[in-house]
């Protein structure tokens, strides 16, 4: 009623420029907070000002019937909105509504803003504003809580996943992390022992998938008086990763050969064979404990892995002995791979020639027949079937000994039963299968390592200076190459891209050592370089790379051309001669034949070496056993050193071999290009 009277009388009140008129009668009815108050306050919001706008002037609808109808509709609409608003917000107490009495409204513009806030859940009056602020704070808190929960749901799985990845990367594969380290170490073991190479073998004895080092060691007892000092012989197993001693086996005599890979039924671990001059002992490869032993006299060779000759499904062994009291008689002895006992009795062979012992080696012909190659100065072959019959007096029952090769039987001498592989006036120095890797790890007794070596052609070095390849099919030389005296066993690797193994060897004369690579297909020279003679006899190593080519590792002194091109020294000759000889380990890659990579240098005398592969790293370790000379402060010692090739390459120094500086010649490769190439090298097992 008050609202209608106010509209009719148009009482003066506080006006605003945009929000219509202010009616003091509505304030009088504020106790009841009737719906008409809301109607008056909401007229401007609904656009029902004068002339339908928010400006001043008489309204055309308010005085008439249509204006009352519109007002009634708006009032009903406002009631619905008010009900919705009151359902959303908490109901105010009667005391709060009483506190609103007597409060003055803001200006019509501010009142309009309050009414707009009311539509969003707020209030136009001060009391309503307080309620709106309280409600807004609750909504903000709820929103913050909701965002915090969402963030927690996102961050908690992320943190858990990160922790799990870190655990997998650093804590769980701790053993693999240890293997990922580059195996580089050095250890002194026993007496220096001169330049005689000790027995050396590689085999994984601790189960970490890396070949460990087994070495024969000679030490002196700790007695102060020399007459009371005695030699102590032992075999030591060293971890290839750290160089730590895994086990030590004391022996009654010096060990000449160490071979691993036998599988005895009574042993879960592989068995290692320790061969001395008068005994053959098998030990557990993991612990070094005795398995069996056999006494023989004057052993001269390593053991040869044979096929099963007894029918017990276990490969057997053969070994050569050369008694001193029976001149020119070489004995071949069969040994059971199951029990370690001798099979039958030793079989003697009277050899006409004299010289260095060759073999014994096992060869399997294309027809599957087995022959043993051996000799003194010459090379003969005899059927394994004949050896078994003569040793046991029984006919063979296994399939391996029943096979005969008609082609080889035609070559057999009717009186001696020998097949002549080589006979000549010049003694044989080396005979090795024409297969990669034979020179580095040919002492393993597992069938896989020996499979290819038994079916290949042969590389023959005779007369100290002639080198040939013999075809196993017809026992004929395919080519012959003559050189100076060859002083170490050749190494076989791929230098060119014809798919045929090439031959790397060293020969020396007149104080000059020359290293050469010969084409295995035709015997033509592929590469050569001259060095100051290092006074060192050590087998070269050929290592396969992932690209198919091989790198060649060899020891030498200063390159001869580099020394000639360098400035001459002014030191007195006597002083220069007293300086220790520095020996260097060089790496040759066929991609850069005019460049060598110097990996390391030492004054020690390297006496034997081997190559161990790390398949998971695509790397290889070069293991050397050196004799360190006696000094004033300490006695000489045997030094065992393992160097990662990839790590050594990164620190290697480039040595150039006589590039031509003439105009129009090949462009000399830059240091960056060479270093980048070598550092990308990766290695694989041959």
Image (cartoon, grey):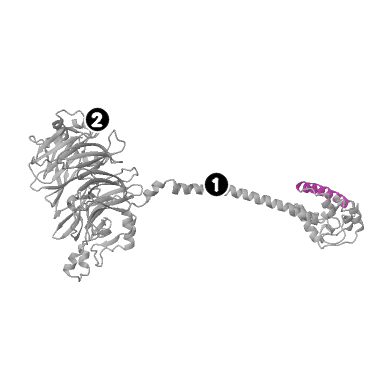
**Point 83% across, 59% down: residue:** 105
- Can the viewer see residue 328? yes
Residue hosting label 2: 312
Q: Which SS class for mark 1? A: helix
Gap between marks 1 and 2 measured at Cα: 60 Å
Q: Which of the numbered marks, if any, corresponds to residue 157?
A: 1
Q: Earlier in the sequence, mark 1 or mark 2?
A: 1
Q: Quadrant of residue 605?
A: bottom left
- 299 is higher (above) or lower (below) than 518: above
- Can the viewer see residue 550? no
Residue 652 position within the rendered picture, expressed as x and y whole percent measured from the top left: 30, 59
Residue nearer the viewer, 563 or 57: 563
**Residue 494 vs residue 82: left or right?**
left
Q: Which SS class for mark 2? A: loop
Q: Magenta residues?
A: 66-88
Residue nearer the viewer, 499 or 562: 562
**Residue 262 vs residue 118: left or right?**
left
**Residue 449 vs residue 21: left or right?**
left
**Residue 146 vs residue 463: left or right?**
right
Residue 250 position within the rendered picture, expressed as x and y whole percent measured from the top left: 24, 44
Residue 502 position within the rendered picture, expressed as x and y whole percent measured from the top left: 22, 50
- 316 is higher (above) or lower (below) than 569: above
**Point 75% across, 47% down: residue:** 88
Label 1: few (<14), some (14–19) or many (≥20) C-alpha neighbours in 10 Å: few
């Amino acid at each position: 009623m008050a609202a209608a009277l106010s509209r009719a009388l148009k009482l003066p009140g506080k006006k605003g420029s945009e929000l219509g008129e202010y009616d003091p009668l509505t304030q009088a009815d504020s106790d009841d907070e009737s719906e008409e108050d809301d109607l008056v306050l909401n007229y401007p919001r609904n656009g029902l000002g004068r002339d339908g706008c928010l400006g001043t002037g008489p309204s055309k609808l308010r005085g008439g019937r249509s204006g009352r109808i519109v007002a009634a509709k708006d009032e009903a609409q406002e009631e619905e909105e008010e009900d919705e608003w009151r359902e959303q917000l908490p109901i105010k107490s009667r005391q709060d509504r009483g506190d609103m009495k007597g409060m003055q409204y803001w200006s019509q513009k501010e009142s309009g803003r309050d009414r707009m806030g009311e539509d969003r859940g707020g209030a136009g009056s001060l009391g309503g504003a307080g309620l709106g602020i309280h409600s807004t704070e609750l909504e903000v808190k709820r929103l913050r809580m909701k965002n915090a929960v969402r963030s927690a749901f996102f961050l908690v799985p992320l943190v858990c996943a990160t922790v799990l990845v870190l655990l997998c990367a650093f804590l769980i594969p701790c053993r693999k992390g240890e293997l990922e380290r580059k195996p580089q170490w050095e250890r002194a073991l026993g007496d220096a022992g001169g330049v005689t190479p000790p027995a050396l073998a590689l085999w994984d004895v601790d189960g970490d998938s890396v070949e460990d080092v087994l070495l024969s060691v000679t030490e002196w007892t700790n007695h102060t008086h020399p007459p009371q000092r005695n030699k102590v012989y032992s075999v030591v197993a060293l971890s290839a990763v750290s160089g730590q001693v895994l086990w030590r086996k004391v022996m009654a005599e010096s060990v000449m050969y160490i071979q691993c890979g036998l599988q005895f039924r009574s042993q879960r671990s592989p068995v290692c064979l320790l061969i001395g001059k008068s005994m053959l002992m098998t030990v557990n490869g993991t612990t070094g404990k005795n398995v069996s032993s056999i006494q023989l006299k004057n052993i001269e060779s390593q053991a040869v892995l044979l096929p099963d000759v007894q029918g017990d499904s276990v490969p057997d062994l053969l070994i050569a002995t050369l008694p001193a009291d029976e001149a020119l008689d070489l004995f071949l002895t069969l040994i059971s791979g199951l029990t370690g006992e001798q099979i039958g009795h030793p079989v003697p062979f009277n050899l006409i020639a004299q010289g260095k012992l060759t073999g014994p080696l096992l060869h399997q012909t294309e027809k599957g027949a087995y022959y043993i190659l051996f000799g003194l100065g010459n090379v003969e072959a005899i059927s394994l079937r004949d050896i078994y019959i003569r040793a046991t007096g029984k006919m063979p029952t296994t399939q391996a000994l029943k096979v005969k090769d008609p082609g080889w039987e035609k070559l057999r001498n009717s009186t001696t039963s020998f097949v002549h592989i080589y006979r000549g006036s010049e003694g044989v120095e080396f005979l090795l299968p024409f297969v990669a890797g034979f020179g580095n790890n040919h002492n393993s007794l597992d069938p896989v390592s020996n499979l290819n070596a038994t079916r290949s052609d042969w590389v023959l070095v005779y007369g100290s200076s002639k080198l040939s390849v013999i075809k196993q099919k017809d026992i004929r030389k395919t080519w012959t190459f003559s050189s100076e005296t060859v002083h170490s066993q050749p190494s076989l690797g791929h230098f060119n891209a014809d798919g045929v193994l090439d031959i790397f060897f060293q020969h020396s004369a007149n104080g000059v050592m020359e290293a050469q690579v010969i084409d295995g297909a035709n015997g033509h020279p592929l590469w050569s370089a001259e060095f100051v003679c290092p006074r060192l006899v050590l087998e070269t190593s050929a290592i396969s790379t992932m690209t198919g080519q091989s790198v060649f590792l060899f020891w030498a002194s200063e390159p001869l051309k580099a020394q000639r091109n360098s400035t001459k020294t002014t030191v007195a000759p006597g002083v220069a001669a007293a300086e220790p000889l520095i020996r260097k380990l060089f790496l040759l890659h066929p991609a850069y034949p005019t460049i060598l990579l110097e990996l390391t240098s030492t004054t020690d005398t390297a006496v034997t070496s081997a190559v161990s592969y790390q398949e998971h790293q695509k790397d290889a370790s070069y293991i050397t056993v050196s004799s360190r000379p006696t000094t004033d402060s300490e006695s000489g010692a045997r030094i065992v050193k393992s160097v990662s090739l990839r790590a050594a390459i990164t620190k290697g120094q480039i040595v150039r071999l006589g590039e031509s500086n003439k105009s129009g010649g090949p462009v000399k490769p830059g240091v960056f290009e060479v270093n980048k190439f070598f550092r990308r090298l990766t290695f694989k097992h041959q």
